[in-house]
Image (cartoon, rainbow, N blue to C red):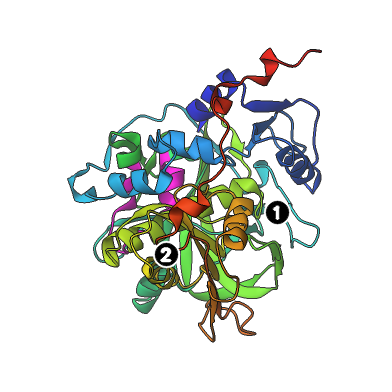
Amino acid sequence: MRDYLSALGREGEVRLVKREVDPRHELAAVIQASQEESEAALLFERVRGSSLPVAANLYGSRRRLCRIIGADDGNFCRRWVELTAALDDVAATQPGNAGPLVSGRISELPQITYYERDAGPYFTSAVFLAREPESGVANLSFHRAQVMSDQELRVRLGPSHDLAKYQAQAEARGEALEAAMLIGAPPEVFLAAAASLPINADEMQAAAAIAGSPIAVRPCNTVDLEVPVASEIVIEGRILPGLCRPEGPFGEFMGYYVPVGDNAVFEVSQVSWREGATFQALLCSSADDYRLLETAIAARIYRHLTETAKLPGIVDVSCQPTLLNTVVQIDKQSHDHPREVLLAAFDAHPDYSKMCVVVDRDVDPYNMSQAMWAYLTRGRADTRAFIIEDVPGFYRDDNRDHWGRLAIDATKPWGREAEFERTRIPGVERVRLSDYLSG
């Protein structure tokens, strides 16, 4: 992470906060205020109660995410599918040297409480690294962790997550699941953790594919795992079998509080960090959270449309302006093509695609205003949208608030495309307003 943060600094994409901030609410308030006017990352030099500086909003920019994976044309989905197409041919790791490490305690790390009703400090940016108990394949994933003490964290493991399945396998054998939490993981590891890959895929191979070379790793001291040497902070421990304890409430990615629930117990065995380490904060439901989730979900839907459903004419996919909405940009092939795309998109990720809009290639899929303009100007409102009733949504949606689907065809009528040619001013792409405006 430090090399990435340094590069952002050289490019003028880091805002420096020199005054001391309180990790309880004040730090999060500054992050939110900054994100409302800028995509820049933040570096807090002084955080009360800890000697470590804090970086935030590192990934709150789609442009930066595209740059990390080499999507020079801005099409994250297409590039992501290319990178993950042949992971078996990628060497995942190689031995590395982390240099001197500092041993510490959980309480020495920044104790950040983000939202008003959060139960206490949380680690929100940690990448959990664990291995499937039988095959040993590496998994990277995100899970919130509530700080209880220097020895205990409480971790949310959703039942659909690979890590929860690993933990269930270990628990069935009466064993704890060893895991390492990486705070300030290198960008390629951070992005790989958000990937939606098959449970038997080695996600360290995905990280290596992004990096273009094997990930340098070192052995942990108290668990049988190897972690990336470039990780700023590593928390080693075990997810205990047969034990759940209350965790929450917590302000999560949907922008609401999740209530107190019994969740997994992580027993901390060691905390260490690199000399000069920086802690990574992540404000849930902010741009830093959404941009990464949006690109990961969109890439999964893009892969489903192109590889599983084998639909032609798929150009790009976005999840804008919320994770629950999918926008698919197509080269329209027939009158029925948009409907086929809509139905396949809903099938691609049942947890998220509550609404889907299909647009033509001349409409920006990352601009919902353009998508709605196209829907309202390119044909009838009553025949180009339909509702699919009683389709299940989130696995924990007991009240069925996320059931049902809304499908919208915002494409031009088939055979009448010439009537809907967009107006264009020649030369607008070459205009630099600074050449025209004075003062």
Left or right: where 101 falls relative to 223: right
The front one of 392 and 48 is 392
Q: Which mark is residue 79?
A: none
Residue 163's label in the rendered image is 2
Q: Position of residue 157 (x, y in %)?
A: 51, 68
Label the magenta part by its dominant secondary structure: helix
Direction from residue 426 to residue 225 in the image, left or right: left
Q: Amino acid at mark 1?
A: Pro
- Point out the residue furthest to the left here: 89
Q: Which residues are magenta?
A: 188-207
Magenta stretch contains residue 205: yes
Residue 363 locus on image (x, y percent): 52, 49
Residue 186 visible from this viewpoint = no
Q: Which numbered tag is attached to residue 121? A: 1
Where, quadrant-wise, is the C terminus in this rendering?
Answer: top right
- Relative to 108, does residue 334 appear above or below in the rendering? below
As drawn, 296 above or below 402 = above
